[in-house]
């Protein structure tokens, strides 16, 4: 399970295929976006490497605090959960051991044992 939900406040975060030198860049996570929710809410993990693309500011909510907040703000939790499920269903860069109820398993890669 992920340890936090991260928000990109300023700058951007680069997404690379791996941590090795020269790995191709797949995209960026811009200011105003968030990442880590899939791990906190669905126990999924990204198979990519994330690095600051220059100077950037991140804010985070640790998973235990996030769970307490979502218990009080169910509408926010439902929105974050829906986003996490959508990403899980559409991205080949996420791994999960078991799909959440109602989520298509056809597009979900399994973690290697």
Image (tube, grey):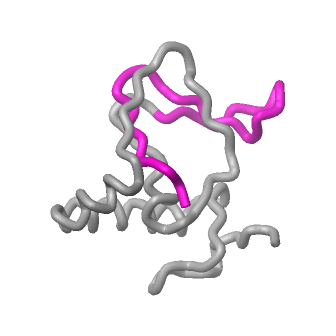
Residue 2 falls within the magenta-colored stretch: yes
Quarter of the picture holding the N terminus: bottom right
How far from the left and from the top, in percent, is residue 37? Answer: 43, 55
How far from the left and from the top, in percent, is residue 18? Answer: 76, 39
Q: Which residue lies furthest to the bottom in this view?
A: 101
In screen coordinates, is 113 left or right of 64?
right
Rendered position, 109 above or below 5:
below
Residue at (69% x, 51% y) in the render: 47
Task: Specify the quadrant of the image occupied by residue 25.
Answer: top right
Q: Residue furthest top?
A: 55
How far from the left and from the top, in percent, is residue 39? Answer: 52, 59
Task: Specify the quadrant of the image occupied by residue 43.
Answer: bottom right
Residue at (49% x, 79% y) in the render: 100
Name the foreground residue: 35 vs 43: 43
Name the foreground residue: 110 vs 27: 110
Residue 43 falls within the magenta-colored stretch: no
Rendered position, 103 above or below 74:
below
How many numbered marks does the figure carry? 0
In screen coordinates, is 27 left or right of 32?
right
How far from the left and from the top, in percent, is residue 76? Answer: 22, 59
Residue at (49% x, 68% y) in the render: 42
Rendered position, 80 above or below 48:
below
Name the foreground residue: 49 vs 104: 49
Stretch in magenta: 1-29
Residue at (50% x, 51% y) in the render: 3
Quarter of the picture holding the C terminus: bottom right
In screen coordinates, is 75 left or right of 17?
left
Rendered position, 73 above or below 50:
below
């Amino acid at each position: 399970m992920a340890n936090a939900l991260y928000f990109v406040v300023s700058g951007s975060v680069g997404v690379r295929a791996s941590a090795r030198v020269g790995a191709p860049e797949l995209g960026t996570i811009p200011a105003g976006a968030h990442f880590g929710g899939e791990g906190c809410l669905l126990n999924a993990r990204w198979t990519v490497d994330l690095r600051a693309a220059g100077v950037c500011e991140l804010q985070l909510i640790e998973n235990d605090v996030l769970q307490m907040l979502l218990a009080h703000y169910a509408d926010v939790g439902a929105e974050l959960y829906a986003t996490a499920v959508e990403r899980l269903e559409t991205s080949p860069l996420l791994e999960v051991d078991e799909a959440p109820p109602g989520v298509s398993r056809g597009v979900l890669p399994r973690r290697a044992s």
